[in-house]
């Protein structure tokens, strides 16, 4: 229980400007309700004045129209007040937007200052100079290779490349390009005939 009651409440995100805008809108809404009620009342009194004139009660109708005229003036003032309240609400809301923009610009400026402290103008110029030097050097090499070498130089480069390739190759026996001739049936049977012919001579010697 102590933890529950001792818990710190989160800070409210509602600013004083938000509260002011809310109050102004509430006042505006009340004036609009009053304006609507007066408008209905004026229409009702106008119809009543017309009825009085029809009934021959001109004095009462005139008095009622004077009252209506006064209420018309109040209605006009109410309209002006509503316009002023709405304009004020718009001004405050626009000021809030401007404050957020200014806060964003402040954060951006602080970030830029931090970056400038990390890298000075001299460092940036040095890096740009080194990059330009590297680019110029590479361009000079490309131009030399593209325009200075003659055809004789190109042939010498190709010959050196061929020599290096031959040094790296391992010498292997050449593979015959002609197909191997097939052995005939008579040639295949010749060893068997020789074996059969020499077999009786070996048996005679053994006896």
Image (cartoon, rainbow, N blue to C red):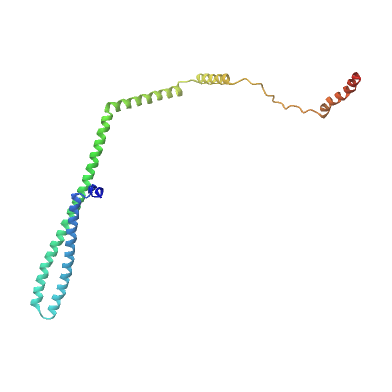
Viewer-proximal residue among 57 and 18: 18
Q: Position of residue 5 (x, y in %)?
A: 23, 50
Q: Quadrant of residue 119?
A: top left
Left-right relation of 202 to 27: right
Left-right relation of 111 to 143: left
Left-right relation of 46 to 135: left
Q: Quadrant of residue 63?
A: bottom left
Q: Residue at x 19, y 55 (%)?
A: 22
Q: Residue at x 9, y 76 (%)?
A: 60
Q: Position of residue 159 (x, y in %)?
A: 55, 19
* Looking at the image, residue 48 lies above or below residue 110: below
Q: Residue at x 24, y 40 (%)?
A: 105
Q: Quadrant of residue 33?
A: bottom left
Q: Quadrant of the C terminus?
A: top right
**Count of numbered labels shown in the rendering:** 0
* Looking at the image, residue 169 lies above or below residue 112: above
Viewer-proximal residue among 106 and 175: 106
Q: Position of residue 145 (x, y in %)?
A: 45, 23
Residue lying furthest bottom: 55
* Looking at the image, residue 18 lies above or below residue 184: below
């Amino acid at each position: 229980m102590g933890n529950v009651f001792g818990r710190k409440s989160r800070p409210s995100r509602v600013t004083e400007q938000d509260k002011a805008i809310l109050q102004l809108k509430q006042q505006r809404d009340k004036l609009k309700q009053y304006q609507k009620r007066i408008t209905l009342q004026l229409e009702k009194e106008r119809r009543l004045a017309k009825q009085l004139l029809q009934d021959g009660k001109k004095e009462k109708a005139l008095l009622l129209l004077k009252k209506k005229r006064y209420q018309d003036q109040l209605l006009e003032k109410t309209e002006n007040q509503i316009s002023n309240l709405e304009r004020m609400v718009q001004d405050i809301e626009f000021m809030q937007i401007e404050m957020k923009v200014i806060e964003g610009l402040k954060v951006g400026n602080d970030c830029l200052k931090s970056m400038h402290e990390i890298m000075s103008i001299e460092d940036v110029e040095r890096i740009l100079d080194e990059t330009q030097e590297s680019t110029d050097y590479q361009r000079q090499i490309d131009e030399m290779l593209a325009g200075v070498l003659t055809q004789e130089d190109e042939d010498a480069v190709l010959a050196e490349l061929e020599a290096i390739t031959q040094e790296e190759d391992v010498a292997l026996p050449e593979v015959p390009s002609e197909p191997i001739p097939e052995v005939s049936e008579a040639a295949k049977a010749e060893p068997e005939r020789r074996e059969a012919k020499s077999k009786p001579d070996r048996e005679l010697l053994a006896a």
